[in-house]
Image: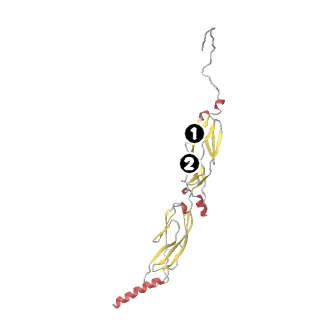
Amino acid sequence: MAGARINSIGFVADLCYCQAVSPTPLPTTNDMTFGLGQVATVQEVSLPSTLHEYDADFTTVCGTTFGLAQTAPGLTLSGTTLTLDSSDPLNVGTHSAQLSLSIDENPTSPALSSFSVTINPTCSFSPITQATPLVDMNIELFGTTTQTLPSYSHQYKSTWDASGIPYTCTIAYRLEPGSSPLVSLTGSTLTLTTNDPTQVGSHTATITAFFDGFAGGEHSQTITMLVSGGALCQDDLISQTTALVNMSVLLGQTTT
């Protein structure tokens, strides 16, 4: 009975001891910086060399648990592994986070390590938007007309601007293959020129807005261009396939 009593007293003493200690400070947790779309990027959390101030002298190991006292969007902790899912464009920005280490028997006084999580904008994750559509173009033969492309932006521009993180998403334009050779594109100016009677009729062109230096997020629109004859009837010479012949008729007769 005495041996059992000693063992029981020893266990209670150990438990009370764990309740009385606090964890030692955590090593500095590295700040984390990622671009959009870097899913499941991992950082291992480091344990301190000693878990509490009497760790070297105390033979019974107190239970410890890592946690996130403050989390950031897309950040999770499993065991000692930090994982960031940065796939949501709305999470662009710098966010504060805190890692905690607590003694299981004394969870009210955890050791904390603060760090930041930064998610940088990636242009291709913000689809290009168009304020107003392009309009079809009508022109008479031997004429020239132009159209300035309307304002283009991208879906998450206001959110990313508000994040305070510097970024550049430059929108450029191109004519797609198969567009009518009558149209040209210089910067944001579309020019339609006609100079040949065979060009009378309907033509099409497809204009694509894209991010310079980034794939994805493109926006395309096809317009119709109608070329009418106009001055063609005035400028073209009238031709005659056969000449008229002289006509003679006897008095009182009719001929055609």
The residue nearer to you, when weighing 158 against 40, is 158
Element on which disc 1 rests: strand
Q: CA distance from mark 2 to mark 1?
A: 17 Å
Which of the two discs, 2 and 1, labels the residue nearer the N terminus? 1
Name the image quarter holding the N terminus.
bottom left
Q: Which residue is mark 2?
A: 220
Residue at the location (35% across, 91% down)?
Answer: 2
Residue 165: tell me if it is visible: no
The residue nearer to you, when weighing 204 against 137, is 137
Residue at the location (41% across, 86% down)?
Answer: 12
Residue at the location (66% across, 30% down)?
Answer: 234
Judge whether 6 appears above or below 230 on screen.
Answer: below
Judge whether 209 appears above or below 120 on screen.
Answer: above
- Marking on residue 203: 1
Horizontal and vertical percent position of residue 67: 48, 73
Q: Quadrant of residue 193?
A: top right
Judge whether 145 appears above or below 105 on screen.
Answer: above
The residue nearer to you, when weighing 69 against 180, is 69
Horizontal and vertical percent position of residue 169: 60, 56
Horizontal and vertical percent position of residue 106: 47, 80
Which residue type carries mark 1? His
Q: Which residue is most to the bottom?
A: 2
Residue 94: tell me if it is visible: yes
Which residue type carries mark 2? Ser
How crowded is the residue under tag 1: few (<14 C-alpha within 10 Å), some, or many (20+)? some
In the image, 221: left or right of 231? left
Q: Quadrant of residue 30?
A: bottom right
Judge whether 46 appears above or below 232 on screen.
Answer: below
Q: Are circles 2 and 1 on residues that touch, CB within 8 Å? A: no
